């Protein structure tokens, strides 16, 4: 006879408020196969764990069920407690009576009944569990970092400086991300390029970093410690080793398209360098906008290139890399202008977004750091900044707060005041959110020292008249209507996950939240991990955040990756598929459905590679003869669980 | 007045999306009826037709299979297999005369606590007027 110990947790009153914990323990005490049953206020506490250890020894228990919170929280705790008492860790299972019971129900009697069913069902499963040992797998001790903005660069540098090889993949021609587009950074007014370019150079020169720009992740397979990644390296048609940056090619290029780096405020040629400090320092021929490569329709750039760097025959390459961990740091884009028609964005040339205004302020920008109107290149005498453009608007736009706009708008207004003497800036806001070191003081400085006028309220209408942008709104503090004849309007647009994020997350098999940002494994305690083991998150891809937060998270993600990369071996769950050779007819259906190529036919029978098998169980549900099943979750176990769940 | 009929439901939830989504419903203290007892499996693709038949056979009034959204399966494509298999099971159940509403499949991601709550509430509301399931129930 099996000797199961059952332990029911009160979780303070989290469970005990709606579940009669004592009744559950009493009911289970008389359940077949159960030798010991008790309840305790906090099973996860040290005394709680000791109760389990003592009970195992005193009552000679051979398996343990703990009914408590979700197994994602304390399964490891209780399995370790069992191990400490000499029990195999896979002879401990968790019944979830908190997240899936006490927290979602109000009727005490019915919740108690359900908690009993859940616990009995867990006992039924456990009675048929085998003692197993974790399967050890070697670790590929290098990492992939996706995204070459500040977060990706920081993660890559931290990993590389710890001695691990890094493949840093960036889809655009240069690393630097959005930070390299910024002028100054709040609250210190550090020059953004000046503080970022040293890191870019370090990343490009680091012997442990393999930099792959103009490249995209095509496919990811494998599992923690052993991912296989296919990276598509797009052709730049320029050999970076030969290019001497003479700029003769772009001078003769007949094509002009909007410049992405200046957000359409200027144009670039089809052959171009994104910005002077670009890394790698080379030109890129944008084949989408080139008049034609095959057959060559123009070829002027190659004619003038004395270095012979232009190679129209360059082909796309698929490069395969093996890595142990993956950090996704794909950043953000701004909420699309097509969504903000009500503020005239995209309709009036002098209605800009925050990033465009950064380019106007930037010394390397299209105006050399002078604030000028795009429409007529005149100095704007009055500028209106509108915060929460697209943010905090669940009916029309994004429900969330984009977090950084209060601060960068204060910076924009402040820098405008410094730049245009006698000019006046106005900021429309809902609230000022300036939590952060030195942030509140920075906003106060904008108001008190630089004379920025803050108006609490929303803008109702924006239209162009007499070469002015008329802004109508209301100041809700004075109750007065406001009409400003502005020369320029700057919208603090909402941040959203960068373009292409949803395709990438499908390749990576990591989850996104309702707004499309990457989901962390736990909102409080696992903020840099994804639910998938070995995959980590950094920067604004996870949620809107400013530079110091992105950097901190990037270092955190690198440290978490190192906890895997620093190990010789990883252990993965032994709950893998096993074949009953007596029943297997070698039909091969399981081989076809296995997503991991973990099953093959050997001597006419299915054979499972334990290291590759992830235990999903798709093979078991496919087999017509029930000849393959996953260990510790077999059809028999599920049938018994069903029975107990139905009160049988 | 007779006590209102309370359907018994077995819900097969995949560990990575739907079980995590139901955990989120709990963490967010959303409320739904206690008629469902969840069984967490690794993947919706591991739910054998036999599990569904077994649940009806043992007296379930409704069976739910819930997995990751198509394209988001933690195990790459398990939920596609589940989707095809479940379409066949549904036909089989209709063929033997079971009300089609008694068997449902849903896609609930780890971020969709609200959706899980809604799925359960709707399922219970659908099952209540149908009364007890007797078609496939084992004769005592």
Image (cartoon, helix red, strand yellow):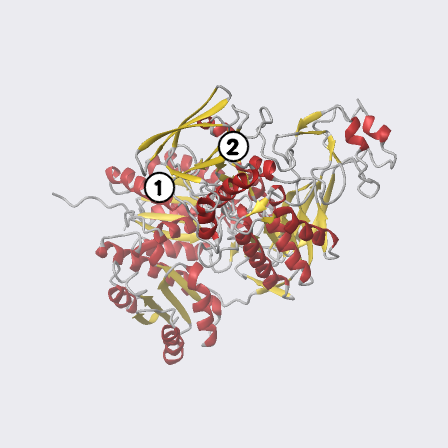
Q: Residue at x 63, y 34 (%)?
A: A262
Nearest to the eye among marks 2 and 1: give it: 2
Q: Residue at x 48, y 73 (%)?
A: A83
Quadrant of the rendered image containing residue B131 = top left
Quadrant of the rendered image containing residue A12 = bottom left
Disc 1 element:
helix
Q: Is residue A643 left or right of residue A410?
A: left
Protein chain holding label 1: B
Whether residue A604 is visible? no
Q: Nearer the viewer, residue A441 or A306?
A: A441
Q: Nearer the viewer, residue A32 or B1?
A: B1
Q: Residue at x 54, y 62 (%)?
A: A574
Query: In this picture, is A248 found above or below B12?
Result: above
Residue A319 in picture, x, y percent from top left: 73, 45
> Do the CB atoms of the residues marked 2 and 1 lie less than 8 Å apart?
no
Protein chain holding label 2: A
Q: Is residue A397 left or right of residue A134?
A: left
Mark 1 nearby-residue class (10 Å; few <14, some 14–19, many ≥20): many
Quadrant of the rendered image containing residue A454 = top left
Residue A385 in picture, x, y percent from top left: 47, 35
Residue A278 in picture, x, y percent from top left: 71, 43
Residue A210 in picture, x, y percent from top left: 72, 51
Disc 2 element:
loop
Q: Nearer the viewer, residue A326 or A62?
A: A326
Q: Which residue is mark 1?
A: B119
Query: In this picture, is A459 found above or below A533?
Result: above
Q: Which residue is mark 2?
A: A336
């Amino acid at each position: 006879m099996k000797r199961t110990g059952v332990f029911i947790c009160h979780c303070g009153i989290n469970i005990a408020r709606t579940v009669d914990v004592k009744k559950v323990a009493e009911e289970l005490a008389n359940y077949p196969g159960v030798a010991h049953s008790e309840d305790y206020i906090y099973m996860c506490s040290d005394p709680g764990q000791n109760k389990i250890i003592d009970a195992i020894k005193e009552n000679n228990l051979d398996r343990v069920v703990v009914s408590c919170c979700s197994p994602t929280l304390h399964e490891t705790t209780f399995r370790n407690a069992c191990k400490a008492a000499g029990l195999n860790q896979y002879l401990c299972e968790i019944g979830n009576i908190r997240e899936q019971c006490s927290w979602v129900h109000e009727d005490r009697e019915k919740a108690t009944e359900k908690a009993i069913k859940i616990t009995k069902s867990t006992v039924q499963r456990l009675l048929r569990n085998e003692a197993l040992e974790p399967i050890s797998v070697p670790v590929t001790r290098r990492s992939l970092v996706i995204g070459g903005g500040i977060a990706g660069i920081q993660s890559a540098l931290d990993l590389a400086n710890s001695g691990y090889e890094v493949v840093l993949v960036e889809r655009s021609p240069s690393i630097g991300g959005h930070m390299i587009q910024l002028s100054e950074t709040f609250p210190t007014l550090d020059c953004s390029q000046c503080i970022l370019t040293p890191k870019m150079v370090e990343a490009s020169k680091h012997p442990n970093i393999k930099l792959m720009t103009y490249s995209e992740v095509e496919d990811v397979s494998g599992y923690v410690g052993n991912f296989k990644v296919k990276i598509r390296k797009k052709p730049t048609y320029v050999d970076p080793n030969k290019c001497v940056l003479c700029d003769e090619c772009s001078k003769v290029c007949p094509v002009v398209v909007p410049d992405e780096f200046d957000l359409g405020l200027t144009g670039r040629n089809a052959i171009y360098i994104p910005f002077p400090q670009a890394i790698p320092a080379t030109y890129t021929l944008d084949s989408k906008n080139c008049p034609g490569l095959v057959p060559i329709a123009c070829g002027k750039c190659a004619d003038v290139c004395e270095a012979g760097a232009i190679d129209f025959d360059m082909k796309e390459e698929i490069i395969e890399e093996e890595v142990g961990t993956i950090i996704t740091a794909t950043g953000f884009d701004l909420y699309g202008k097509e969504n903000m028609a009500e503020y005239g964005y995209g309709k009036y040339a002098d209605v800009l977004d925050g990033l465009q205004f950064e380019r106007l302020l930037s010394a390397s920008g299209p105006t050399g750091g002078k604030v000028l109107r795009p429409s007529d290149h005149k100095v704007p005498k009055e500028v209106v900044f509108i915060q929460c453009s697209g943010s905090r608007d669940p009916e029309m736009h994004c429900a969330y707060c984009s977090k950084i706009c209060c601060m960068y708008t204060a910076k924009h207004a402040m820098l405008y005041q410094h730049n245009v003497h006698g000019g006046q800036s106005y900021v429309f806001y809902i609230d000022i959110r300036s939590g952060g070191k030195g942030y509140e003081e920075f906003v106060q400085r904008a108001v008190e020292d630089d004379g920025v006028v803050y108006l609490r309220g929303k803008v109702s209408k924006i239209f162009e008249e007499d070469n002015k942008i008329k802004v109508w709104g209301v100041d809700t503090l004075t109750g007065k209507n406001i009409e400003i004849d502005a020369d320029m309007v700057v919208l603090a647009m909402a941040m959203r996950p960068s373009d292409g994020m949803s395709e990438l997350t499908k390749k990576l098999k990591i989850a996104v939240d309702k707004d499309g940002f990457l989901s962390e494994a736990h909102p409080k305690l696992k903020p840099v991990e994804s639910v998938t083991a070995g995959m980590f998150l950094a920067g604004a891809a996870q949620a809107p955040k400013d530079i110091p937060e992105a950097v901190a998270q990037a270092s955190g993600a690198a440290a978490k990756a190192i906890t895997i990369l620093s190990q010789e071996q990883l252990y993965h769950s032994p709950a893998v598929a096993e074949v009953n050779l007596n029943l297997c007819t070698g039909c091969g259906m399981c081989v076809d459905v296995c997503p991991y190529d973990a099953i093959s036919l050997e001597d006419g029978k299915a054979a499972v590679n334990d290291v590759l098998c992830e235990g999903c169980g798709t093979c078991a549900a496919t087999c017509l003869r029930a000849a393959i099943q996953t260990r510790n979750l077999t059809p028999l176990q599920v049938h018994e669980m069903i029975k107990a769940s139905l009160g049988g | 007045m007779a006590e209102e009929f309370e359907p018994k439901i077995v819900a097969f939830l995949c560990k990575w999306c739907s079980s995590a989504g139901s955990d989120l419903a709990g963490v967010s203290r959303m409320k739904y009826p206690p008629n469902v007892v969840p069984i967490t499996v690794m993947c919706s693709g591991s739910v054998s037709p036999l599990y569904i038949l077994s649940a009806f056979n043992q007296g379930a009034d409704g069976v739910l299979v819930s997995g990751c959204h198509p394209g988001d399966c933690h195990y790459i494509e398990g939920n596609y297999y589940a989707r095809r298999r479940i379409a066949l099971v549904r036909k089989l159940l209709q063929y033997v005369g079971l009300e089609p509403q008694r068997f449902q499949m849903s896609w609930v991601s780890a971020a969709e606590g609200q959706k899980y709550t809604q799925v359960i509430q709707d399922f219970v509301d659908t099952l209540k007027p149908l009364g007890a399931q007797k078609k496939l129930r084992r004769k005592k």
